[in-house]
Image (cartoon, rainbow, N blue to C red):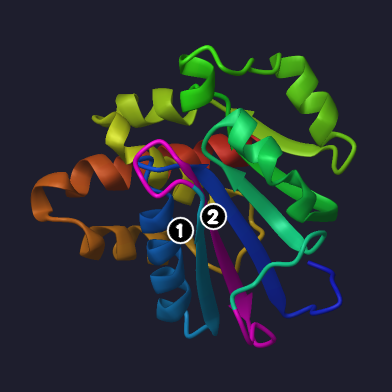
């Protein structure tokens, strides 16, 4: 990975409240700590209630002195939903990677008929102005396959590891997921992580 801070990777994670964005950031940070890596986590909320815009940042590496990911500096932008991903596309660096779930969750304004939802091709075209590295798949579908749509964030965790952009191994990620959830949810969440990892690897 090449950047001005060659030993640091900047990750921005975006979605809507209730999708598990914050939990993903926390588990990713724990996995980095398990690998004895320096890590900083930050969170920015739009509307605080469920359904509002949420952004988390995770910076991993020796040069990560604070949690802020400046526009044009994210190596990886992780989006739980297409329009929410586009909303933060300015964070991606030139040559950076977008990892996005294609499943649409309409924002409140669209559901209420106060705004239109962009066509998928328009969303991708707008993203391509920033990067042509877009890994896209239906993460909610994979979460359902794992046993629960609530495991969406663990699908995205696996996909992050699957890109190969972080120094976190699959084994460490799975171990941290096992520790993070009650025993009865362990199989669903570890399966979701593995499915996401395999999907990202196949798309890379």
Q: Residue at x 30, y 58 (%)?
A: 177
Looking at the rendered structure, the secondary structure element under dot 2 is helix
Of mark 1 and mark 2, the one earlier in the sequence is 2
Q: Which residues are magenta?
A: 47-66
Asked whether residue 60 is drawn in magenta, I would say yes
Q: Are marks 1 and 2 in contact (CB under 8 Å)?
A: yes
The image shows residue 29 at horizontal and vertical percentages of: 45, 70
Q: Residue at x 54, y 35 (%)?
A: 199
In which quadrant of the rendered view does residue 164 lie? bottom right
CA distance separating discs 1 and 2: 7 Å
In which quadrant of the rendered view does residue 189 lie? top left
Quick check: can you spot residue 204? no
Looking at the rendered structure, the secondary structure element under dot 1 is helix
Asked whether residue 64 is drawn in magenta, I would say yes
Query: Pointer 1: what residue?
Result: 170
Q: In the image shown, does 138 or 106 lie closer to the viewer?
A: 106
Q: In the image shown, does 98 or 45 lie closer to the viewer?
A: 45
């Amino acid at each position: 990975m090449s950047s001005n801070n060659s030993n640091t990777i900047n990750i921005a994670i975006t979605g809507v409240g209730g999708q598990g964005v914050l939990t993903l950031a926390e588990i990713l940070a724990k996995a980095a700590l398990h690998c004895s890596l320096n890590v900083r986590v930050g969170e920015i909320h739009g509307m605080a209630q469920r359904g509002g815009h949420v952004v988390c940042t995770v910076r991993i590496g020796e040069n990560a002195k604070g949690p802020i990911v400046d526009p044009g500096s994210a190596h990886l932008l992780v989006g739980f939903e297409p329009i929410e991903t586009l909303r933060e596309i300015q964070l991606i660096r030139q040559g950076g990677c977008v990892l996005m779930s294609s499943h649409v969750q309409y924002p409140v304004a669209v559901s209420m008929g106060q705004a239109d939802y962009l066509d998928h091709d328009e969303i991708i075209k707008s993203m391509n102005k920033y990067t042509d590295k877009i890994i896209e798949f239906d993460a909610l579908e994979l979460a359902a396959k794992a046993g629960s749509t609530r495991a969406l964030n663990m699908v995205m965790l696996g996909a992050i590891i699957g890109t190969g952009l972080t120094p976190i191994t699959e084994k460490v990620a799975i171990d941290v997921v096992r520790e993070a959830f009650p025993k009865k949810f362990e199989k669903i969440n570890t399966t979701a992580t593995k499915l996401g990892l395999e999907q990202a690897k196949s798309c890379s």
